[in-house]
Amino acid sequence: MKIWHLECLLNSFESLGFADFDRDSKLADLLLQTSPLIDKWNNVEVLTIDEGKDSDSPHFWDCPVPVFSERAYYTVQDFLRNKAEALSLNHPEKIFYAIHVLNAIDAVDYQKAIIKQLDTGFRVGFEKYAFIEEKVEDEHIFRIFLDDRIRSAVFVSDEFKKAVESDGLAGFQFMEVWDSGK
């Protein structure tokens, strides 16, 4: 089993940003939490910031969440069920969703992971990920904790990655961060 860090390709692909940054930028902090936002989320307008090839997962400059095209959403919606919410983004030409991952799991194997820390001892990230296999084996999309803080990075399973690739979705990038066989 492998775990992948879900990212988007920037080179030559379109990217998005808030149409009204001053009004909507406060939503970025809410998207880091794991409380549902569907009731607070309305009429969030986005624009294409950088023109490029059409992307099913365009980079969203103003928010730390994945964005999926309508096609990508329908491809992976079964993996998102009860784990993430798709928040509609109003774009003048296309249908996009901000994917707010609600599923944060305490699955880091701190005995095997290599943690980045400041000289003060404050832990700020990972040099090498390691997971507790039993905690990730049935998880297809999730975020993790570093100590008591939820990280913004989104991780996905082999099955999620295969669904995206088999449907030929553009703009996704998967970085292998852990292999249970190694």
Image: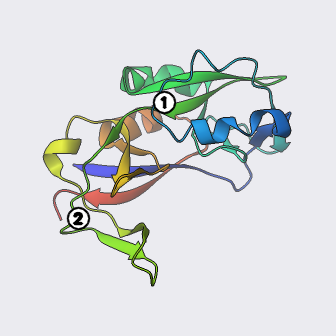
Q: Secondary structure at mark 2?
A: loop
Q: Residue furthest bottom?
A: 119
Work out whether 92 lies above or below 21.
above
In this rendering, does residue 70 appear at all?
A: no
Q: Is residue 122 above or below residue 38?
A: below
Kind of residue at disc 1: Asp
Quickly name the residue at label 2. 110
Disc 2 versus disc 1: distance between alpha carbons? 35 Å
Image position of 47 with respect to 181: above or below:
above
In-front residue for pair 19/8: 19
Coordinates of residue 93 in the picture (x, y in percent): 82, 22
Q: Position of residue 53 (x, y in %)?
A: 75, 42
Say which amino acid is labelled 2.
Answer: Tyr
Classify the position of the C terminus by image quarter. bottom left
In this orientation, which residue lies closer to the viewer: 31 or 97? 31
For label 2, the crowd category at 10 Å Cα-Cα, with few meaning under 14, some 14 to 19 and many 20 or more, is some
Task: Looking at the image, tell me whether mark 2 or mark 1 is earlier in sequence order.
Answer: 2
Determine which quarter of the picture holds residue 120.
bottom left
Query: Residue at (24%, 49%) from the top-left corner?
Result: 107
Q: Where residue 97 is drawn, which disc sits there?
A: none
Q: To which residue does mark 1 refer? A: 167
